Amino acid sequence: MAQQTLDAFQVIADPSRREMLHLLSKKSLTINSLAENFDMSRPAVSKHIKILNVAGFITIQDIGRERHCMLKQDGFNELQEWINFFDKFWLTKLKKLEMLLQQKSIKQ
Amino acid sequence: MQKTIKHQFFFPNPPEAVWEYLTKAELIEQWLMPNDFQLILGYDFRFIVKPMPSLNLDGIAYCKILEIVPFKKLTYSWKAGPGEGEITVDSIVEWTFVPKDNGTELQLVHSGFKEIENFNVYTAMDNGWVKQVGIITSLLNK
């Protein structure tokens, strides 16, 4: 499925999806009330919701006859993992540079 | 949520020597990555590493030199993505060289992850969580 290959950055690169997460950060909403905030077809809204769900940014709970969307931590964790990866990456590389430059200063 | 990567290193070398290691392709490769860097304002270059499928990155960083202040500052953009020209990460790498007694302090700031910064949900998150738990609880208790 195409959605499963979307990474967290791709998911939040879309302005409508960001707006959906903004709205959901204030309170959980039913799919219907979420859709009211967007000038797009119901299937288009559903597609975005599905992407957010698959990527772990939201969960959908059926309560009575309504489907409630709420934020979920997983998608956000993936973004944090990316930052953490690059943090370590630079630290490792800079230690290597430190070693090279120390050798150079001893030779001089 | 942390949005900016910062590191600070001291080297026992003058800024000119440290500058060389950040601006000459063959010296950059010794500590960082294979690249086709050239010290020209606006120049497009690439860093090439192995693909990182867990991060959905093809291992190529597409960069453009944005600022050159010899021996003081070097800034380039850093874009990456899953491949085929698709860019999912759009960021800025900033190097600042501060002369010190007996050496140079090199500061790195990797920031401007546009998608993250455009995305202020993080600051709203904690608040949101508490509210949601309350709402769900009240709904379930109906």
Image: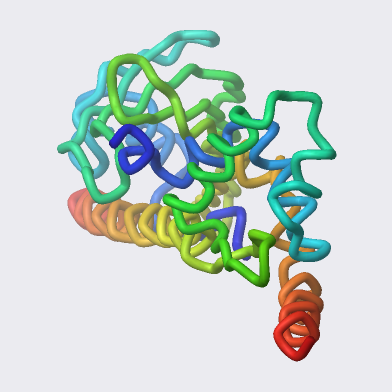
Q: Along the line of sight, which residue is nearer the eye, A84 or B76?
A: A84
> Where is the N terminus of chain A found, in terms of image quarters?
top left
Q: Where does residue A93 sit, x and y in percent of width and height?
A: 29, 52
Seen at 35% across and 28% down, the residue is B61
With respect to residue B58, does A86 lie above or below? below
Question: Is residue A61 visible from the viewing direction of this image?
Answer: yes
Q: Tell me what residue is drawn at x 47 percent, y 65 percent.
A: A74
Q: Position of residue A89 (x, y in %)?
A: 32, 54
Q: Position of residue A95 (x, y in %)?
A: 30, 60
Camera sees residue B113: no
The structure residue drawn at horizontal position 69% and vertical position 50%, both measured from the top left corner, is A31
Q: Residue at x 73, y 87 (%)?
A: B137
Q: Position of residue B85 (x, y in %)?
A: 35, 15
* Vertical comparison of B76 with A33: above or below: above
Instruction: Tell me which corner region of the image, top left, top right, bottom left or bottom right, holds residue B22.
Output: top left
Closer to the camera in the image, B106 or B92: B92
Q: Is residue B15 left or right of residue A7?
A: right
Check the image and name the residue furthest to the bottom.
B141
Q: Farthest residue to the front: give it.
A: A65
Give the vertical position of B38 relative to B10 (above or below): above
